[in-house]
Amino acid sequence: MNNEIPMTESQHLGFLRFGHLLVIGPWSFKFCTMLRLRQIVFFVLSLAVFAAFLGWPIVQVVRVGFQGISTDGKSGSFTLAYIAAVFQDQNLRQGLFNSFTIAVLVTLVCTLISVPLALIAVRYEFRGKGLVNSLLLVPLILPPFVGAIGMRQILGRFGVLTSVMQSAGLVAHGHPVDWMGINRLLGIVLVESLSLYPILFLNLSAALANLDPAMEQAAANLGANRWTIFRRITLPLMRPGLFAGGTIVLIWSFTELGTPLMFDYYDVTPVQIFHRLNQVAGNPMPYALVVVMLLGSTLLYVIGKLVLGQRHDASVTKASIQSTAKTLRGIKAFTALLPFLLVIGLALLPHIGVILTSVSGIGQWYDSALPRVFTLAHYKTSLSHELTIPSVGNSVKFASFSVAIDLVLGLMIAQLIVRSNLPRVLRQLIDAMSMIPLAVPGLVLAFGYIAISLQLQTIFKDYKRVRDLVDVTENPTLLLVIAYAIRRLPYVVRSAVAGLEQTPIDLELAARNLGASSFLTMRRITLPLIGASLIAGGLLAFAFAMLEVSDSLILAQRQQYFPITKAIYELFQRLGDGPYIASALGVWAMVLLMLTVLSASSLLGKRMGAIFRV
Amino acid sequence: MIPPPMRRYVFLILFLFVLVTPFALRRLYGTAKEANSSGRELVILSSHVEGIRREFAEAFCRWHEQNFGQPVNVVYLNYGGSADILKYFRNSEQTIFKSFGTYKIDLVWGGGDYLFENQLKYFVDENKVRRPGCLESIKLPDETMRFAFPKPMLNGIQLYDTHDNTWFGTALSSFGICYNKDVCRTLGVDEPKTWGDLSDARWSRWVVMADPSSSTSAGTAFMIVVERAMLDAKAQGRSEDQGWAEGMGRVRLIASNAKMFTDSAAVVPSLIGAGDAGAGMVIDFYGRSQVEAVGSNRMGYLEPAGATAINPDPIAMVRGAEHRELAMRFIEFVLSEQGQKLWNTRAGAPGGPSKTSLRRLPIAPSVYNDRSNFTDPVDPFTGNLAFDTSNARRKTFPILGELIRMSCIDLLDDLRETRAEIDRAGRKDLEAKLGMFPFDQAEALRRLSAWSRATPLERIALEQKWKAEFREEYRRLREEAEKGEMAKDP
């Protein structure tokens, strides 16, 4: 047993300072002051970014929830009555309860799916593993709007399942079944789990890749059985990954709007907010409800942190040797492959629905297992449409810039959370803040950005250049990139934090002791060590930025700046062939995104392999 | 076999191939011109769909170049439905309009006459004080007015703002029932002919409707059902107030058959086309387009005889428009014969849109004289589809959507359960009770007045009180039905 008391990072830094004091005396004071100063600068900078691009837009929108509808720029007096009213309304109470239930169940199901898959993927080599490992991530890149159509085509009353069951004699002809209406809560949990598990899988794979196999080998040598090893060694060591992915899934499913809407299930908070935001008559309730949802998400995050997020000794987790996967053949290889195929098969149902819709004649996929008429005409129409080409370029541009910002910001924030010796409460503050973007409904943030765009134009009314830069109707690039970056920041922060927590600080300290500058240490030691985690977070951020809906619809107003999601939306609204050509463009975007991930993976080679084990 | 060193580039090559596909296809098949960014700019805030926006912009640019020899660049802004348009103007009023005296928008186009007349023309603040909104009064050339609006009214509805000349209808919309014929066969019901047919219990969980508190067009459709019932009551010697309760009761029975209420009226026909829903209330051009898309052997669209209303869809100049002259020309173009013909002429036919049939009804009556290339040979000016609607009967409109939301949408499970319990008990008397709203128009107007006066906080209290009343009503009806059933059992 290791009886040493683990040292925290702050203690490490303290130790470092003490060591310096002994060796080089007065120099250390300067070093410490500089270190501390840099941390404070980073902290203030992070706070400023959150305040300006998250706090300001949110406050613009949700202050109505504390003041009522303001008119003539005059604000009403502050009141908590609207927040209280949320809890007095039976429907809204039920909505909160249902949302909590869904969030907890989805996180559980995702964990049950991801942990075994990640373990199999890390432990064993078998034929087809590379392919299924990549396919596992595809559920993340379902294009918006058309995903619901794909699902309806399969589970709808005249959809594939009814048709197949009728052919098999399991459902009587002339009695279409509303599969999505049987148990909607369960349906939502399943569909959300099958689309969100990749987030957890990615984080767990990164965590397992960082795990030192020597620990498990030592336990096995000491006679522990597999279950004990898993329970006592593997699970605790992969906890940073579980926490990183789990909290994202928890908050995401708590605030998820699309899936409950698809199931016509209105008694959940996000749908209640959405419906009330759309109401013709102005109403402060949705804004009060947003505040309650933000508080609820924070509560969930804190609970997650208490259950999974306890710090542990990072200095012993980073792999000193590469784990070797056991090669499986024959029936064993097939047994290992089976759970992957099952999960992928189920998770890709909506994608298959969208793909088949995109090649079906209009109205020809109805009451049958497959479309009756196949055509490629929708691809011709959508890909040659004047909206399409500029939108692809715009999306790639906006998403790339935003991911670059996320990587810089995310790494800075992760350093503050894990490595700084700032007071704990400040570190936790910045940690919780970096998760808020996940919990804010997209529409609220989008309208918040519109409000600040209008205000900035007024503030800079004498500076035309600045005014044009912040005027979304002129050019939304700046605000759209910032909006994407802020909304996708949690993925990068969580990945970077998980990577840093699993990386022993000793290596960085050694480099600093040998005289490396902090920049050199970051470049040569820290970045290579947490590279896998950063790539994982960066890829998630990129994929989700490419598929971002609310900001894209609201902020991009001029056709020349439409991102691809807005182009899909515009085509989707066309009468008659809209859903079909939107599906075609959606499939094209999906394939492009998939190939982006795959080419990155094959070009980055082993570094990427640490996550995907391709 | 691909040599191993090349293998790592396979995905990259595939990626590049996929990336260039749209460029190649555009070169081969793309017909639309790139937007002309060199010309003068006209900024239009519009909730119209892509096809309408594109076809009108292209036609206007051609027309402008022919008549004035200058290129124009039409820029559309689209923030969503009427609620979002209103939100945008209210936000901008306090910021850029205050600072620069302009909303940076020249025209607002589409969203229904209610938005223009009741929400944009005047802004009403918290203290119910009315002040001028974001629309500007304009004078159109007499020639344009004579052509587009030989009569200012149709079936009791004004086709343009006859008082202040702020907005002008550009097209007409009516409402009808869209239904799936396969579903009718499956359920063993006749194809619906009247609004009341949708209240048949056999449609349970097969009807789809848009939420009237989110979509003004859905609100208008429900108002038609209520107004028709008021007229019928009057014809049968009962009061219109009483007819209002019967109409709302009919809405409630239809709602008890709802599979769902959607946020957007546009989704309704596609759900019916796919067979996920059996029938629903839709705007005419959505319904007709969907029928053509999936075929009339599967789907039908019908406007109940003498029981629909026809509304104008306006355009208006925005106060402080920066490109006034161009904006005026655009309005004149939309209201000219050339512009009006775009609405309903088949795509590709002479005078029609270039790529997409728009399937909407023109507002200028003379355009209907030659309907040879029309996609839909309907004439709202001569047919007996609509009845004479009146503002007097539409007084409850501002609260209708809210009442439907509180009694039917928020309590949908309660309502469905109540209807099912009544049907199980076979109690026609209780069905009739459910089919009669618990209060009449006079009480609805009292509630409207209380609702309009109330602060947001008071509204929450009112909503909770009214919802509790509906909930209690449904509970009592279920209780009565259960008692009846128990009495039947032995």
Image (cartoon, coloured by chain):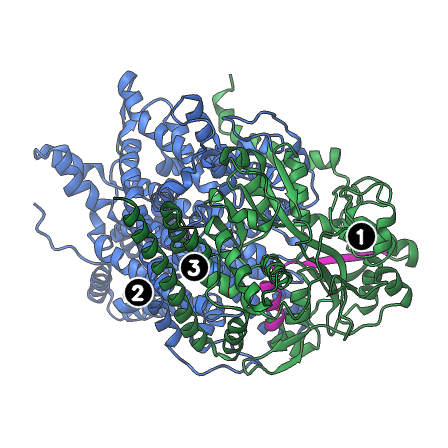
Chain colours: A blue, B green
Quarter of the picture holding the C terminus of chain B: top left
Q: How far apart in space, not on screen, are marks 2 and 3 (Cα)? A: 43 Å
**Vertically, is A572 above or below A419?**
above
Under mark 1, the amino acid is Thr
Chain hosting mark 1: B
**Vertically, is B324 above or below A197?**
below
Chain hosting mark 3: B
Under mark 2, the amino acid is Arg
Q: Same chain for marks 2 and 3?
A: no
Pick the front one: B232 or A422: B232
Residue B110 position within the rendered picture, expressed as x and y whole percent measured from the top left: 69, 59
Q: Is residue A435 magenta?
A: no
The image quadrant that residue A99 belongs to is: bottom left
Residue A492 position within the rendered picture, expressed as x and y whole percent measured from the top left: 40, 52
Q: Residues within 10 Å of mark 3 (few under 14, many from 20)?
A: some
Q: Residue at x 53, y 60 (%)?
A: B246
Q: Which mark is residue A427?
A: 2
Residue A169 position within the rendered picture, expressed as x and y whole percent measured from the top left: 40, 22
Q: Which mark is residue A330?
A: none
Query: Is residue A444 visible from the viewing direction of this image?
Result: no
In this figure, which residue is indicated by the disc labeled 1? B382
Q: What is the magenta range?
A: B71-90
In this figure, which residue is indicated by the disc labeled 3? B410
Residues tagged 2 and 3 counted as in contact (Cβ below 8 A): no
